[in-house]
Amino acid sequence: MPQIIVDHSDRLGLDRRAFAAELHPLVARTIGSPVADCKTRFRRIEETYVGDGDAARDVVLLEIRILDGRTVEQKTALAEALLELLERHAVPAEGVELHLAVDVVEMDRRTYRKSVSAAG
């Protein structure tokens, strides 16, 4: 925890490592979680259809799953900070309108489980 999923259009310019390097400390600072607990996966989307289907539109959808118990203010601050980070890092292709969205999803701490192991 936190679990972060970044779905983005195929032609989007995004330095994933630079984005994640800023993303994890920002999340940790905002919700009081250790940086080491942040996990991000990026998924490039082959095809998107936005609005009326105009090909000059791309999307980035960031979903962050966090344990329940945070205040509405913390979740709102997190969503706003993540959107601003996306605005700085996501580079649309020439002549393309870029749609960004962030969704903060709560996980139930009563049922969430995780495991960490190391080889050797």
Image (cartoon, helix red, strand yellow):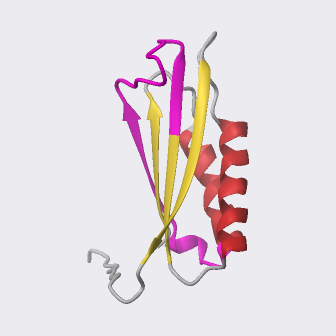
Place residue 94 in its image quadrant: top right
Which residue is pictured at 66% across the width and 74% down the height? 31
Magenta residues span: 31-60
Above or below: residue 117 compared with residue 49: below
Which residue is pictured at 57% across the width and 43% down the height? 101
What percent of the width, then of the height, locates residue 18? 63, 45
Q: How many marks?
A: 0
Left or right: 62 as drawn, with respect to 83: left
Q: Quadrant of the C terminus?
A: bottom left
Left or right: 112 as drawn, with respect to 92: left
Above or below: residue 37 compared with residue 104: below
Above or below: residue 41 compared with residue 91: below
Residue at the outermost bottom position: 110
Is residue 45 on the magenta stretch?
yes
What percent of the width, then of the height, locates residue 114? 34, 80
What percent of the width, then of the height, locates residue 104? 54, 61
Residue at the outermost left position: 120
Q: Return the residue nearer the eye: 73 or 52.
A: 52
What percent of the width, then of the height, locates residue 71? 66, 79
Which residue is pictured at 62% across the width and 20% down the height? 97
